[in-house]
Amino acid sequence: MIGGCAKDGETGPAGPAGPAGTNGNANVIGTNSVNISSWTWNAPFYNATISANGITQDIVDRGMIEVFRSYGADGWTNLPDILGINSTTFTYKVGEVKLWNSNSDFTQPSYPAPATYRIVIISASNRIAHPNTNWKNYSEVKKALNLLD
């Protein structure tokens, strides 16, 4: 004998809503803007550390990180940001991004001005899904990954 199902009653109430997504896409984490005004001198660099819980070992191994600096009305530029002999670059590891500010001639740079940075954490699947995206261009990254400001 084969069993079956029958609709014996009325439809029950709707279940609770699920949790909200992160910046419109479950596979990308665009951090909120981070204002950096405190740097530490470690000759020949100034550095600043930003916590980024979304950087997992899988992101380190297969994903990608982009860091952008705000220039207000002039928009966002990706790092490295090079102005004359001064540059700001970044490194990352699980849970954090470190910003580095230095002069190419190894002289001590001026103390970095306060600035706003945005970290975009991109999974390998999103990178593959958007092969024509210029990941160095914030407008393209924002459009491809449905990032919210």
Image (cartoon, rainbow, N blue to C red):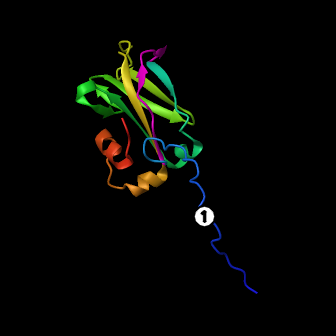
Q: From which residue to which does the magenta span run?
A: 27-44
Residue 31 drawn at (x, y percent): 45, 34
Residue 116 drawn at (x, y percent): 37, 24
Q: Residue at x 39, y 19 (%)?
A: 106
Q: Residue furthest left?
A: 74
Q: Is residue 50 above or below residue 30?
A: above
In which image quadrant can residue 8 be found?
bottom right
92 horizontally vs 144: left or right: right
Q: Is residue 116 above or below residue 142?
A: above
Label 1 environment density (alpha carbons within 10 Å; few <14, some 14–19, many ≥20): few
Residue type indicated by callout 1: Glu
25 horizontally vs 17: left or right: left
Residue 36 drawn at (x, y percent): 42, 20
Residue 82 drawn at (x, y percent): 30, 28
Q: Nearer the viewer, residue 9 or 111?
A: 9
On the image, numbered disc 1 is attached to which residue?
A: 10
Quarter containing the N terminus: bottom right
Quarter containing the C terminus: top left
Q: Residue furthest front?
A: 9
Q: Residue at x 34, y 29 (%)?
A: 69
Element assignment for label 1: loop
How many numbered markers are drawn? 1
Q: Residue at x 60, y 64 (%)?
A: 10
Q: Is residue 43 magenta?
A: yes
